[in-house]
Image (cartoon, grey):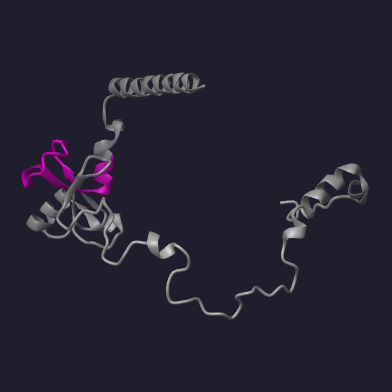
Amino acid sequence: MATKLQLKKSEEFLQSADSGRIKNLTSIGAQYRFPKGHQPANKGKKMPGFAPGRMAETQYAKGNVPPNYLPLGSERYSKEGYLQRKMTDTGYPPKDWVPVHWLLWIQHNGPIPSGHRVCFKDRNKKNIVIENLELLSVAEMMKRNSRHNYPAEINEVIYARASLTRHINKRLKNERTENDK
């Protein structure tokens, strides 16, 4: 930032006692550094075909799978509460796991168009049947999930409840930090 602002230390400062401290910081460890032009002992040498040291002992062997591996077709619940099924095995979870309600929709109605989402009519994520699914655009989703389409009295209650929840959470957090001390 100092360079961007074209700021430099004055000669007066550099000659003062404070600047000596800065000079000492830059020279710490200088005796242990490689000098300019130093050639490493292994320069130009090829590494052997095996892992050096104990590295080979601690590496996963080919074909070995981690203990938390799940095979194709396995199901799990996401953090958001959606049931997901493992469809591919790329090792990249966002592509490997697909929500089951998407699969059901695609099976009955074809691909999901871009800009649209498959939603639950009764808002119960565990009720995965085709009669409970509907296709909504992103705009329709926003209107459906927005508090602004309620009457003013209900909006005030929703706002007050959210404010109260924030205050409660703040107090709980403060109590936890005090107890940790």
Q: Could you tell me residue 85's position as x and y percent?
A: 17, 52
Q: Could you tell me residue 126's position as x and y percent?
A: 14, 39
Q: Is residue 108 left or right of residue 99?
A: left
Residue 108: within the magenta?
Answer: no
Q: Residue at x 86, y 47 (%)?
A: 20
Q: Could you tell me residue 168's position as x and y percent?
A: 39, 19
| Most foreground residue, 123 or 37 | 37
Q: Is residue 166 left or right of residue 46?
A: left
- Image: 109 above or below 120: below
Q: Could you tell me residue 121's position as x and y percent?
A: 14, 39
| Most foreground residue, 18 or 2 | 18
Q: Residue at x 80, y 52 (%)?
A: 7
Q: Is residue 73 left or right of residue 172?
A: left
In this picture, which residue range is highlighted in magenta?
118-142
Residue 119: within the magenta?
Answer: yes
| Most foreground residue, 120 or 50 | 50
Q: Quadrant of residue 59?
A: bottom left
- Image: 90 above or below 136: below
Q: Quadrant of residue 94?
A: bottom left
| Most foreground residue, 50 or 28 | 50
Q: Residue at x 11, y 39 (%)?
A: 127
Q: Is residue 36 left or right of residue 40?
A: right
Q: Residue at x 27, y 63 (%)?
A: 90
